Image (tube, rainbow, N blue to C red):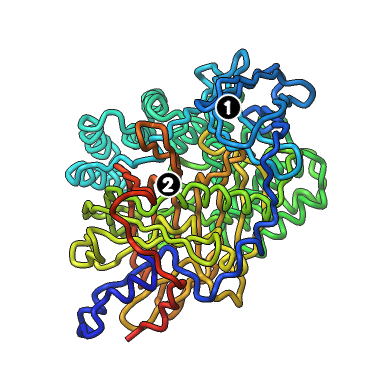
Amino acid sequence: MSASRLLRSLPSRLSCAIVASFLVAIVSSSQTAKPTAISAHNSVKLQAEPVLVKVRVLDASGLPLDNPAEARLFSDANPRVLTATTQEASIADLQNVIPGDYELEVSSIGYKKTTQHLHVFNAGQDFSVFVYLLPDSEHLQIQINDTSAKSAVYLKPELQRDINKGLEFSQKKQFEKALREFSKASHHAPSNPSLWYLQGTAEVGLRRPDDARKDFLLALSFDPAHEKSLLALAELQLQDDEVPAAIASLERAYHANGGGWRTQYLMATAYTRANRLPEAELHALHAVDFAARNAAPAMLLLAEIQLREGKKIETQQTFDRISARFPGSPSAEEAKFRGARLQSESPNLVASLGDLPLPSLSDVTAPADSDSPWAPPDVDDMEYPIASDVTCKSDEVLDLAQDRLNSQLLNFEKFTATEHVVHQEIERSGLPEPPKEKQFSYIVFVYPYAGNSLYLEESRDGGSSYSAFPTPMITTGINSLGVALLQPANREGFNYQCEGLTNLRGQAAWQIRFEEKKDSTASIRRWRNSKATYNIRVKGRVWITSTSYDMLRIETDLLEPVRPLSLTRDHLQVNYGPVSFQDGKQSLWLPWSADMYMEYRHKRFHHSHTLTDYLLFGVDETQKVSAPKIPPPDPADHLQ
């Protein structure tokens, strides 16, 4: 439900005690000011004339494909099939393509064939699209499994209890008991990769690396992109001096999931052992930037690499930074010792490559309870591989994405879905409490206003359903987030930067970072309690496909804590994908799932939302709902 309608639906005479029992996290909200005309932002002028479609084929690392590739363009509406083979810079030219919807098939010997939806625009210039091809060899293949993003696998409460027991035993280093609990859970959910990963960590604790390796490989057989299993396998491979295999595992993890500090640290270690020092230094620098409290060992590794590159001044500067940033720590003492050796020009200055440090499977250092990992990294603590020599303009990408969104939603008046909500409180140790689950009938109304703009109004079971929600902390507006981000009035309140082209779920996607301006009044995130509605300033990234300009994913984080709410963390990730209607003839890109991680009043929560069983109702349906004639008013005007 939109923010304003949600607030108006609350009874105005509820006692303070009842109102205070609910806290509403509004994912997106309607504009608080009259939107400008869509043309104010949509500067891309679309034409109906045929256009040259240039298909650039990339490998998993974002480089032009060495092998020749064939591109085929076809559609149900047009019997004509266009084909072309890549030439210089791995580009295939498809001539005289009429703007519209197509399927694009790209294949090359030794690579996995891919078929993607292509929505062709003519903006007065060649229409360039990018396609990633993955190696067909089994040991390098990254599974592109849209169903993994489409719906999370929820474990039964009794299985979750077994897992929590195993995690508690692991924390106490009682690995035999932990293994027993993890094995019990995996027996009931044998295709869940996370359970095999946990078994592997227990085997590592029992010093049985061969058994651990089997468990990690089994996890990867169910999900070849399972990040934790890839990193754990790479560590075992490094310990056994299987450096090329470790690099392959780490690159798979990086290209499939991006890289936080731990991935960056392991990649820096592996590249150093392979004597690929420039790459090692780059990843070590990123590990230092992302590592926060674990930065000391990452900085020691960086100093090792700089020393091997002959950068004596930079090495000493890194040692000095460790001493200044972590005074009195073992890392600072090590830095002082190595710095003294560096100044003395000791002949034993350079340590052997095999002495480079490695993190443990859990963490480099044992974290305090308050620092135990419980949520994904902040959006600025992650890096995703970007294709080289590919540039983009944020306004152009956002304009085309907005046009694509409007072209789909304007034909529909409402759509419904089944929503599955799972609420979990996370203990300070990082262990989740038993989940509370609820299923709703979810309905979304599509309203045009202010020219070509749109907004969505959402509700559960025909109303607010506060009493039926599994927790007093309620989230709403998941479907609206992508729409709100593209609205002209909201875009005035954000700074955008197109960071480049990346590979997300096997599709080439434009990666755009956004950050809300300090003076913005058009927030897309709000929280509400009985006292007030709070605009939440956010930063984040959005990924938009380069072939159809549909949204693949949005992630947001707080720009700063919200002190009046005692809200210190609010991480949201929404995955989008195609939903088919009318016997597969109609497809609309809608949210598949959303995960929200919150730290509120020193308590931690995780909300999961999965949307399935979508039904669309077009504008020509007999049952119609009148659209409002004016934009919805500011929710703050309706506080009691």
* Residue toward you, 237 or 189: 189
* Amino acid identity at mark 2: Leu
Residue at coordinates 58% horizontally, 51% vertically from top-left?
403
In the image: residue 366, left or right of residue 517: left
Question: Percent position (x, y) of residue 248?
Answer: 58, 27
Residue 378's disc is none
Q: Quadrant of residue 460?
A: bottom left
Q: Number of numbered discs present? A: 2
Contact (CB < 8 A) between labels 1 and 2? no
Tag of residue 104: 1
Across and down, in percent, residue 156 comes to: 20, 43
Relative vertical location of residue 456 with respect to residue 78 in this rendering, above or below: below
Along the line of sight, the residue nearer the viewer: 404 or 433: 404
The image shows residue 31 at horizontal and vertical percentages of 50, 71
User: Residue 590 has which mark?
Assistant: 2
Quarter of the image where the N terminus is located: bottom left
Please name the residue shown 76% across and 56% down the image. 317
In the shown orientation, is residue 547 left or right of residue 88?
left
- The residue located at (48%, 47%) in the rendering is 408
Please report whichever mark, 1 or 2, sits nearer to the chain's N-terminal start. 1
- Residue 293: give x, y in percent of width and height: 54, 58
